[in-house]
Structure formats: structure tokens, C-alpha cells
Image (spheres, rainbow, N blue to C red):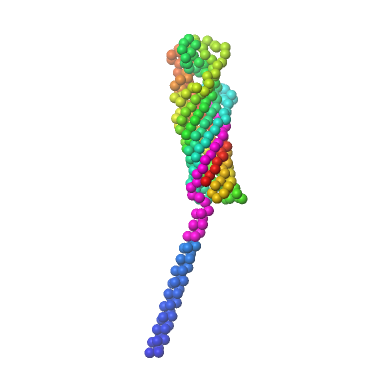
Amino acid sequence: MKRASILNIKSNKKNMQVFSSAELKIKSITAIIVLLLLANITYAQDFKKFRFGLKAAPNISWLKPGSPNFEAKKDANKPALKFSYGLMTEFALSENYSFVTGLEVTTLGGSLNFPDSAYYISGTPPDNVFILTRRTYHFQYIELPLTLKMKTNEIGYMRYFGQFGFNIGFRSKVRADDRGKFTDQNFKDAPNEVEIPESLDISKDTQLFRVALNLGAGIEYNLVGNTALVISVNYNNGFTNALKKNSGVIMDKTIPTNNVNHLPLNQKATTNYVALNVGILF
């Protein structure tokens, strides 16, 4: 009996050791899982996954001619000071990478000098032929930026970042100021140039869509909590022709044979700009 009792005691001690070992393993695994969860929660709290804000951006914009009709006088194509504003939204992919989009109202401009052969009909005869020498454009687009934002870790209160992506724009309106001379159907030279101020709606002579490359660099300055002041400089390079390839209004009198059969002027120019963006992200 004593021997059986001793064997039972040894068996119980062995079972208790097994259970203690298993319990220790369970506790260890549980502790590791808790630590991992806490670490994950802490990491998730290090950055906000969604941010939004407002921005304003003065820009210097210009038209880059791509048609031989504009190339001869391209040095005289002047830039314009314009403005944009809108909503910024930022979706964090990680602490240092974000997908940035938004909705912006962007005004762009610039001037093009036309060849002496460009004209259109305006007003009533006899002197209703307007020889167009210069046109200043005033575009307005609704733009959707689609960019990747790459940020450094916080240095003091600042983060430095770079941006790369594209802008997709939809023209909402466009007007023009024209400079030129009125003459008759025989194209007799008129002595004085006149200006037609910003009253010409030329929507039918421009493209509806705009696609552009968007490159930028800037800083985020932490104000308090997740609120930050954002300042960046962005270069926006248009890919698409801003004008109708063959004008529906402007004719080219270098193409014979008579006034009626003159062909539409071939035109191509892209819109480009450099913008200073200032905004607040929440």
C-alpha cells in the first residue's frame, strides 16, 4: 500500500508539473499576444489614417505652344498670375506614406501670339474680319489630384515630404481677351490694333478634359495634436492639348483658295503652372 501511495504521489507531482508547464506556456503565449496587440494599437495611434483640410494656392501659369502656328513667336507668350483653392484629403498607407486627393477650383492663364494669317468673323460687314494677333486665355478647371505623398519622420515639429502623381481636370469655363485688327473681306491692312476685353466665351474652341503631371515638395509643421500647417511648391505639367486641334472659329487665310474655303487654324498648346500651396490639415 505504501508503495502504491508513493507511486500515486509521484504521478500527481508529475501531472502537476505538466499542468504547470502548460499553464506557463499559455501565460507566455497570452502575454506575447497582448504585447503584440498593445504594440499594434500604439503604432496605429502614432498616425491618423484619415486627414482632411483646406488649401489656397497662388500660381504662375503659362501656355506652352505645340503648333507651328505659334512657334515663330513663342518667346512672346507671357505667363499669368492666377489662383486656386479647395479641399485636401489624405489617406495614410503607413506612417510615412499617404495617398492624397481632394477637389480644387483652379484658374490658369497665359497668352499666345497668332500668325498674321489667323482671323475670324466678328460683327457685321464690311469691316467684320478680325485679324487675330494675340489672345490671352482665362481657364477655370475643377481638378482632382491623385498623388503619393512620402514623408520623413518628425524632426522637431516638422516633417518634410515629396509628392508625385497626376491631376485630372474638367474645364468649367474659359474666356479670352483678343488683340488684333478689323478689316474687310479683302484683308486690307488696318492701321491700329484694338483689344476685345474678357468677354469672349471660347468654350467651344477648347478641350473639356485636362491631364497633368504633379510634382511637389514641402513641409508639415505640427501646430497641435493632429493639426498641421502644410506648405509646398508644386510643378504641374499639362499632357493634353488645351485647345481644339482644328479651331471652330479661327481660320487660316494662308490656305487658298478664297475666303469661303479657308481652312480652320491648327492649334495646340498645353497649360502648365507652378503653385505655392498653403493649407491646414486636421
Residue lying at 53% horizontally and 28% vertically, measured from the top left = 109
Q: Is residue 173 magenta?
A: no
Q: Residue furthest right?
A: 156
- In magenta, the rendered stretch is 37-66
Between 126 and 246, which is closer to the camera in this rendering? Answer: 126
User: At which x and y percent is residue 177?
Assistant: 53, 22
Residue lying at 57% horizontally and 25% vertically, measured from the top left = 77
Q: Is residue 14 left or right of residue 229?
A: left
Quadrant placement of the N terminus: bottom left
Can see residue 142? yes
User: At which x and y percent is residue 162?
Assistant: 56, 43
Residue lying at 52% horizontally and 38% vertically, measured from the top left = 214
Q: Residue furthest bottom?
A: 1
Residue lying at 50% horizontally and 40% vertically, measured from the top left = 87
Q: Is residue 49 magenta?
A: yes
User: At which x and y percent is residue 107?
Assistant: 52, 31
Above or below for 28 versus 170:
below
Can see residue 147? no
Between 173 and 114, which is closer to the camera in this rendering? Answer: 173
- How many labels, in total? 0
Above or below for 233 versus 270:
below
Between 75 and 175, which is closer to the camera in this rendering? Answer: 175
Above or below for 212 versus 114:
below
User: At which x and y percent is residue 132?
Assistant: 52, 18
